[in-house]
Image (tube, rainbow, N blue to C red):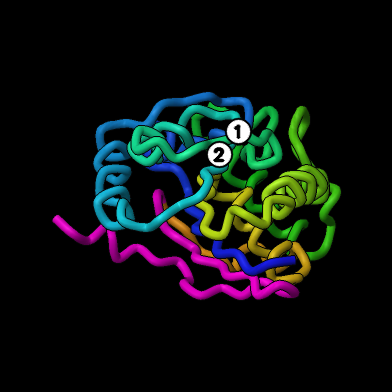
Amino acid sequence: MTEKTLYIVRHGQTDLNKQGIVQGRGMNTDLNAEGRAQANMFFNAYKDVAFDKIYISDLKRTQQSIQQFIDLGIPYEKLSGLDELAWGKLEGARSTPETKAAFLQMMRDWKAGMLDVKFEGGESPNEVQARQKEALATIMSHPEEKTVLVCMHGRAMRLLLCLLTEKSLIHMDEFPHQNLVLYKVTYDGSRFEIAEFNNAIHLQIH
């Protein structure tokens, strides 16, 4: 396989992000004003990168985050494998002591290696990684696409970074993120390496 550079970003802020409410795959929300400002800052910082292709999830908040790049004429493709993990019954629910406790218990279970555990109506980390492998196979099957922009979601991004760095999913929380933060990952033909970790410099330009 040929060399490739992936610029992987999380989508911009939505109102549910701001309120601390779990979104997940089932919530197709829009960016809020802050999210649009973040998208603008990211575009201004990276508009001169010669991206060959853009890959986004099926959820509109990812397309809204990088629409300005699409407007430059860069081809893009939606891959459902890049969608956020489905949190099932937790999605869109107001945070209560009960939901918070259930969420923290799930995090503990996952960290303990119980990677098939999921909320009712949701997905497990192993299920998400299975569809991410398909999405990654699609992205990597185009050797002519040397520099690629990928816009996805927080929890899913953590799982993808484990996949790329060949780490067990129990290490997912070692990849911090905020809205529209960048992980730049290079592929040398045999392995992936993180060149820029949790880069938010572009969000500090005002």
Q: Within the image, what quadrant is residue 80 found in? A: top right
In the rendered image, residue 5, in percent from the top left (x then y), is placed at 55, 64
* Total marks placed: 2
Left/right placement of residue 91 relative to residue 114 reads left
Q: Which residue is mark 1?
A: 78
- Looking at the image, do the residues carrying marks 1 and 2 touch, with CB atoms under 8 Å apart? yes
Q: Is residue 39 magenta?
A: no
On screen, 133 above or below 200? above
Left/right placement of residue 184 relative to residue 91 reads left
**Residue sitting at x 75%, y 57%:** 110
On screen, 63 above or below 151? above
Ranked by sequence position, the earlier of labels 1 and 2 is 2
Element on which disc 1 rests: strand
On screen, 12 above or below 44? above
Q: Nearer the viewer, residue 165 or 47?
A: 47
Q: Nearer the viewer, residue 6 or 65?
A: 6
Name the amino acid, label 1: Lys
Q: Is residue 184 magenta?
A: yes
On screen, 44 above or below 202? above
Q: Is residue 92 visible?
A: yes
Quadrant including the C terminus:
bottom left
Q: Is disc 2 surrounded by few (<14), some (14 to 19) or many (20+) residues within 10 Å? A: many
In the rendered image, residue 33, in percent from the top left (x then y), is placed at 25, 33
The magenta region covers 179-206
Q: Which residue is mark 2?
A: 56
**Residue sitting at x 74%, y 51%:** 141
